Each structure stands twice: as structure tokens, then as C-alpha cells.
Amino acid sequence: MRISRFIVFFIFLLLFNSCGGTQTKLSKQPSMHTESNADDGMIHADLQSCDIKSKKFFVYELLHDSYYWADDVEDKNIDIFSDSTSLLDALKSDKDRFSFIMDKSVYDEHFNSTVANDYGFLSSSMGEGNSVILFVYPDSAAFKAGIKRSDIITKVIPLDDNKSAILTLLSNDGAKREIKLSQESYTKKEVANSKIISMGDKKVGYFVLNSFIGKNINSDLDQLFDYYKQNGIDELVLDLRYNGGGDISISAHLASLISGKKSFSHVFQHHLFNTTYSESNSNSYFDKYSSHALKLKRLFVITTENTASASESIISALRAKENGMDVITIGTKSYGKPYSMYPISFCDKVFFPILMKNFNSDYDEDYDDGFVPTCEVEDDYFHDFGDLNEKNLKEALFYISHESCSH
């Protein structure tokens, strides 16, 4: 069952589609039907059988063929592994921190829908059973309950319906409260907390982009940049501190909105396959034109170790010589993921293998270990996004005023 060459071909089609191409479907191999779908961004591999051995064999073959580190993959007896996930964990390269397999039902809920059904917040453990709220989605159950970034969850009591819980919260001012929270459906809004900050004769735009996964992000970005354009902002602070990546075409669109006509049609990234498939190497591009675009000379980006992949590609692409942008990073070192993975559905699973390494138009290999910040600042959990006292935004504004870090 040689299917990997066609998977590589479909990756090319998906990249082409993101730049305005047409949807193409292809059926090959008597043992499997494979097609790309520009609407859901997936490659569909319909195996003739969905027994455990067939699924393991599918993963095994791809790892030995089109996987970026195929040369590192050992030959193993697949029968000794209980499932495709344990097989992947045993065979993937030591360099690979990224490839994974998930249930398709989970994928559909989190990656292929604009609607979420959960509590509506992100949190991080602080130890001793406590966790701090990092981000609250607008219009979610948590948002309606008044939960805010910096609130500390000290206790969680799950209720019998498995969809509700009683949370004990400690606010930044020391106030303690108890809230019953139930999962609700809400429209995911990844573009959030936008504002314009006046600094003397300068106007500074600021917003949070929490993810590059979603069907409404480009239109939300266009609307926001129209607002920035109408108000004549001079600088922009892009908060990507919890943005783990997503769709490269969205990051290329955002980069186009930031840099404007000086980058239109330039190479956003070069995408390089392994040596077996080097003839399939391809490019993604900045937009050919956008009426919503600004023409900023530089960009400030807030980063943490959770800033990864498509988020890092913006920094890399805009720093390329031909785009002539100064990208100043504030925060802590980013994650380091100059690689692309595409969702490949097979039976009830979705496989995210690393298939390409990405470079900007200068072919810089500059973020395997993450981007070291221009100005190092620890994440400030205890101030909300856009608060002028929040340490990362405060540092960016200091740099704008003084053309240097504060320390």
C-alpha cells in the first residue's frame, strides 16, 4: 500500500488552495482511497480495513516514506505494538517533539468547528492544587460568570452530570468566591482584547491572537485592521503568548496585513520535504493584495514558550531581508517549531505527522530552539490583556518611547 507519494501531492494542493487555487481530488491505490479537501483542510485516507493492524501499517508506512525524518525511522515488527499511537511513539525521531495521533471526534470538536462546547477558559497549574486563569473566551460560560485572567482556581468539585463543576476562585484583590459553571456552546473568537493606546503623538494598536485555528479568523482580522487603518495607528503590538499555531495561510494573511504592499506576493515560507520528495518542495506566499493592509515599518510580538509554529513563522517571514521589517519580541523564548504537519484522517483517527521543514525567503534556519526575546519579561498572569501595567505590554510601550529595553 504505497500511499505516501500521493499524500505529499495533496499537501502541495492544500498549499496551492490556500493561495487561491482550486480544489482537486484524486483517487489512487486499489487498497485505499485518498483525497484532499480544501474545505476542512484535511487529507482523507480511507483504508479498506479499519482493524488495528491496518491502522498500524498505515502509520508505519508513512513514517518510513514521507515523514520528514524518515531516514531516522527503524524497522520494527508492528505486531509488538498495541495500537498506532504506541507505534508512533516508539518509531518517531528523537528530534520530533510534535507528531501525534488523536481521535477524529476530538479533532472535529476542536479543529473543524467555529463553535466550542466547554467552560471557555485556559488555565495553568501553579502547584499545590491551584491553577491560574490565563485566557477567557468572549461570550463563553466563564466570561458570563465574570471569571477573569489572573483569577486563581483553588478548588474544583465536578458534578454528577460531567458537564458542570463548582469552582472556588481567588481574585487578584484577595476576594474569594464560589461559582457553579456549566459547559455551554459559544462561537470561538481567537481575535480578542483589541485596543488603541495613545502615547503622545503616536497611536499603538494592540490585540491578542490566541490561535490560527478557525474559520472566522481572517475576516475578524480584516475588520480589525480596517479599524486600525481608519484610526492611523503608528505601531502594533501583537500578543501571541499562548498561540500554539495552526493554519499557515492565516499567518501569511496576518503578515500581509501588517507589512502591506512592500511584501505583497513575496515568499512567506519555503516548505521542504525529505530528500525522497524534494521535487515536491513548495512555497507559501504573502497576499497578492489586500485593501485592509497597513504598511508598518516594524512589529512588536509578545511571546512565551507556548508561542509556536505558525506564530513563529510570522516572526521569521517578516524578518527576511526582502520584507525589511524589524520584529521586536517581548517576553520569554518561543517554543521552536519550524515544521509543518497536516491532519491525515484514517478510520476513527487523525494523524499529525511532521512532513516539512519551513524556512523564510532567506532560507534562515533560525528557530529550532525558539526565538530569544529582544526584551526578556516573564509572563504576567496577574494583569489582564491590554492593561497598561501588564509587564509585557508595558515593556513594549517602553521600547516604543525609548527605542530600547527597560533593562
Image (cartoon, rainbow, N blue to C red):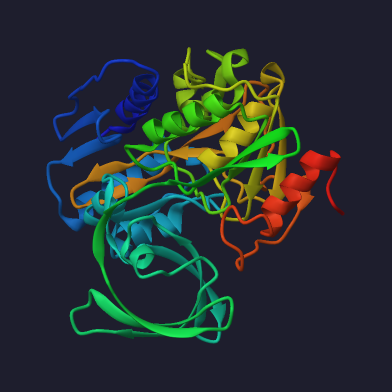
Number of numbered discs:
0
In percent of width and height, residue 151 lies at 51, 73
Tell me where residue 403 appears, x and y as whole percent: 84, 38
Give the side of residue 264 with respect to residue 223, left or right: right
Residue 350 located left or right of residue 267 = left
Q: Quadrant of the C terminus?
A: bottom right
Q: Residue at x 19, y 52 (%)?
A: 348
Residue 164 at x, y percent in the picture: 25, 77
Please name the residue shown 52% across and 20% down the image: 286
Q: Quadrant of residue 30?
A: top left
Q: Is residue 158 above or below residue 109?
A: below
Q: Residue furthest front?
A: 200
Q: Does residue 161 lie above or below 318 as drawn?
A: below
Tell me where residue 80 appears, x and y as whole percent. Answer: 32, 64
The image quadrant where one finds the N terminus is top left
The answer to whether 359 appears left or right of 23 in the picture is right
Q: For residue 208, say whether it is visible.
A: no
Q: Is residue 295 visible?
A: yes
81 up-or-down from 76: above or below: below
Q: Compared with residue 399, is residue 229 higher up or lower down, i.e. above or below?
A: above
Q: Residue at 39% of width from left, 57% of height from top?
A: 137
In this view, the residue in front, 66 or 336, is 336
Of residues 228 and 14, the one nearer the viewer is 228
**294 vs 114, nearest the viewer:** 294
